[in-house]
Amino acid sequence: MNASEVLNMIFKQLTVPPIGTNCYIFGDAASERCAIVDPGGDAAGILAAVQELGLTVSAIFLTHGHYDHVGALPELRRALPGVPVYLHPADKAARDGSLLPDPGPTEDYVDGDRVLVGGLTVEVIHTPGHTPGGVCLKVGDTLFTGDTLFRGSMGRTDLPGGSYDQIMGSLRRLAALPGDYMVCPGHDAPSTLEAERKGNYYMREAAGQ
């Protein structure tokens, strides 16, 4: 992605029920296409935000399959027929009906995949540990980290499918990314990758500092 693409990126954050999940809308001003990240709830509010931005949804991205990140999918599918929903296959395989409900039909995306949203390129980084199929999404200088990396913390590993060793490996990989990024987590406040490298105990532990 070049500098002009970054400048054309439209960005909006919503906090949605049931437990305060961060849902993001990002889009390409030139093509007026956008994507929704982690529609945990309040489909009507998400759709209203898209309409207010004057954009057309071309994809829905799930950083992982937990119920609080996918709850608005049924209503969004009805309102946006034909829009693909992307989820890592490891979370589809691990669904249990409660924490990891059946998300319905989804497209697979895996580590290293790139998906276009208008003129924006979404790069997929597989970051297991919170769930087997957790991913982070890199778009220009923005990093959507789901429940892998939080401001000053990391995702839980004590839930079914969680792994402390795996999330340490995922944090180590994120810490090694060149440059800095705006970190957009699945809950709580945003941060930057450089701030987390310096001040996040778990990321420092993962990086061997």
Image: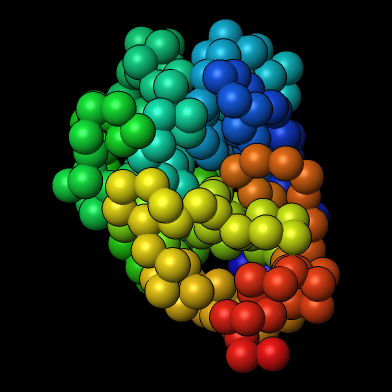
Question: Which residue is at 57% across, 14% downward?
Answer: 42
Name above or below for residue 86 compared with residue 78.
Answer: below
Q: Position of residue 161 (x, y in %)?
A: 30, 53
Residue furthest out toward the left: 93
The number of numbered badges drawn on the structure is 0
Looking at this view, name the residue that lies furthest to the bottom.
208
Horizontally, residue 170 falls left or right of residue 86, namely: right
Q: Position of residue 69 (x, y in %)?
A: 48, 33
- Can you say which quadrant of the picture contains the N terminus? bottom right
Q: Nearer the viewer, residue 180 or 29?
A: 180
In this picture, residue 4 sits left or right of residue 69: right
Image location (x, y in percent) of residue 43: 53, 14
Please, which residue is most extreme toward the front here?
158
Where is residue 200? Give x, y as percent.
Answer: 74, 69
Asked where in the image residue 193 lies, by quadrant, the reply is bottom right
Write the residue at 71% across / 72% down: 201
At 61% from the left edge and 86% from the top edge, which residue is drawn? 207
Please tell me in which quadrant of the rendered image residue 77 appears: top left
Residue 93 in view here: yes
